């Protein structure tokens, strides 16, 4: 089987998606399959002196007007084409005669464009783009979702049969495992975290569904208890929203909250290995990578009692209502003494997310796509013969 992977546009700097295609490539090759990865090249997007808006539209032109020429050529030599990010599902229009698979990581933006989240508004162009993405998913031969929660969204929002949708859990895209204590201490010191300092960790972007506001409120409540009053909150993110900054200032938490940006995976591994716990109070996710990253490093995980967090964390995490800070803090306080037990449960849970399991799941999806394409061709031949016979 020859597999063609369609990766992301490098100027968009979506490093996790680029790592995902690299992980698939290495895993498939190790399993004995021929693999090639192609990406939309930055052509118009390389023009100098672009405004932010112009850069976005030139990027769209690179991805969806210029790239299909090279995609068609490469696809003609493949048994199956795998679009690694559903944001590029528009490209399925050029793969009608070719077996293809699309990975859908989440439909949060699509749901927002349909006004499913109160207080969020999407521009006309954004709504149109999301409709095109959902249409692209519906045209694909098979859609693979990172979680059952995302699969449910695909089946609800896209005109697609359930037999054309499956769930394949992604594997860790970095070799996360617990660092030796001395190495962890050395690395966290370089991040201005003191030797022996107890901290809870949060990893996530500043997007609304990551619930940074809820995170700060839970932490604020947690440090009112004598057992946890010494904790600090370390946030690994690109930045804080104005409302979160205001909440920190109003709670006089400036000395208790630290923000770290642009972190290398090895330093993130050190934080996971040293943290008292991971707090992950997202209200929505497509998967929730920090949950299994933390578990792989032996970090106890406290997260939301909503899918897919419950799906991903399994028996290795403790759950709370992300919209009830007092209850969440109480649950964390009660379970921190059982950190050793949580650590072992996390190690056990993370075994589900191996590269071998992921590759086996995608090979099943590829075969489903090839079968669906063959059946479609057969139906087309029969229809043509019937037309001629009539």
Image (spheres, rainbow, N blue to C red):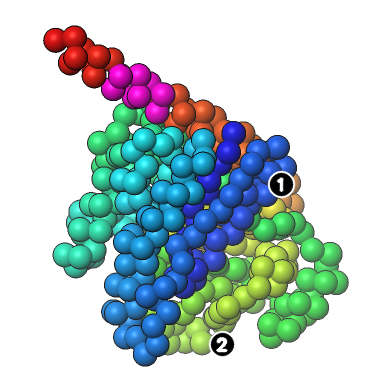
**Residue 109, percent across and down?**
31, 58
Q: Residue at x 56, y 87 (%)?
A: 255
**Residue 17, percent across and down?**
52, 59
Q: Residue at x 61, y 55 (%)?
A: 22
Task: Using the image, tell me which numbered label, if any, was put on residue 255.
Answer: 2
Tell whether label 1 touches label 2 (CB within 8 Å): no
Q: Nearer the viewer, residue 130 or 50?
A: 50
**Residue 81, percent across and down?**
48, 42
Q: Quadrant of residue 178?
A: bottom right
**Residue 351, percent across and down?**
69, 41
Above or below, comparing residue 16 to residue 197 in the picture: above
Above or below, comparing residue 19 to residue 268 in the picture: above
Q: Nearer the viewer, residue 52 or 78?
A: 78
Q: Residue at x 34, y 24 (%)?
A: 376
Total of numbered circles in the picture? 2
- Quarter holding the C terminus is top left
Res. 376 visible in picture: yes
Specify few, some or many for label 1: CA neighbours under 10 Å numbering under 14, 14-19, or 20 or more: many
Above or below, comparing residue 263 to residue 166 in the picture: below
Quick check: is 250 in the magenta stretch? no
Q: Nearer the viewer, residue 136 or 315?
A: 136
Q: Residue at x 69, y 85 (%)?
A: 192
Quick check: is 377 in the magenta stretch? yes
* Region of the chain picked out in magenta, as a range: 373-381
In the visual, does 359 lie left or right of 204? right
Q: Main secondary structure of the magenta part?
A: helix
Q: Quadrant of residue 12?
A: bottom left
Specify few, some or many for label 2: CA neighbours under 10 Å numbering under 14, 14-19, or 20 or more: few
Which residue is disc 1 drawn over?
347
């Amino acid at each position: 089987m020859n597999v063609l992977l369609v990766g992301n546009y490098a100027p968009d700097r979506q490093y996790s998606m680029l790592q995902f295609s690299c992980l698939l490539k290495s895993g498939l090759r190790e399993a004995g399959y021929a693999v090639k990865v192609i990406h939309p090249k930055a052509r118009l997007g390389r023009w100098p002196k672009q405004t932010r808006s112009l850069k976005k539209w030139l990027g769209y032109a690179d991805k969806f007007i210029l790239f299909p020429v090279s995609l068609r050529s490469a696809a003609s030599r493949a048994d199956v084409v795998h679009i690694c990010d559903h944001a590029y599902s528009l490209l399925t229009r050029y793969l009608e005669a070719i077996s293809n698979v699309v990975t859908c990581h989440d439909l949060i933006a699509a749901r927002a464009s349909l006004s499913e989240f109160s207080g969020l508004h999407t521009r006309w162009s954004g709504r149109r783009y999301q409709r095109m993405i959902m249409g692209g998913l519906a045209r694909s031969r098979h859609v693979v979702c990172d979680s059952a929660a995302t699969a449910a969204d695909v089946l609800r929002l896209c005109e697609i049969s359930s037999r054309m949708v499956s769930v394949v859990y992604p594997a860790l895209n970095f070799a996360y495992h617990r660092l030796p204590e001395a190495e962890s201490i050395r690395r966290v010191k370089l991040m201005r975290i003191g030797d022996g300092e107890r901290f809870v960790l949060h990893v996530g972007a500043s997007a609304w569904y990551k619930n940074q506001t809820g995170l700060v409120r839970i932490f604020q409540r947690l440090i009112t208890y004598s057992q946890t009053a010494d904790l600090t909150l370390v946030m690994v993110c690109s930045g804080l929203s104005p409302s979160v900054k205001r909440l920190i200032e109003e709670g006089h938490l400036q000395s208790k909250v630290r923000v770290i940006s642009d972190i290398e995976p090895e330093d993130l591994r050190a934080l996971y290995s040293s943290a008292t716990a991971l707090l992950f109070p997202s209200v929505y996710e497509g998967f929730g990578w920090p949950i299994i990253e933390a578990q792989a490093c032996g970090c106890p995980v406290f997260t939301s009692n909503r899918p897919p967090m419950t799906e991903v964390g399994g028996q290795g995490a403790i759950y709370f209502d992300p919209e009830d800070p007092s209850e969440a803090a109480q649950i964390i306080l009660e379970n921190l003494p059982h950190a050793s037990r949580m650590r072992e449960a996390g190690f056990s849970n993370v075994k589900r997310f191996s590269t071998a399991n992921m590759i086996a799941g995608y090979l099943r999806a590829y075969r489903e796509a090839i079968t669906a394409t063959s059946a479609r061709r057969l139906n087309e031949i029969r229809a043509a013969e019937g037309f001629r016979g009539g």
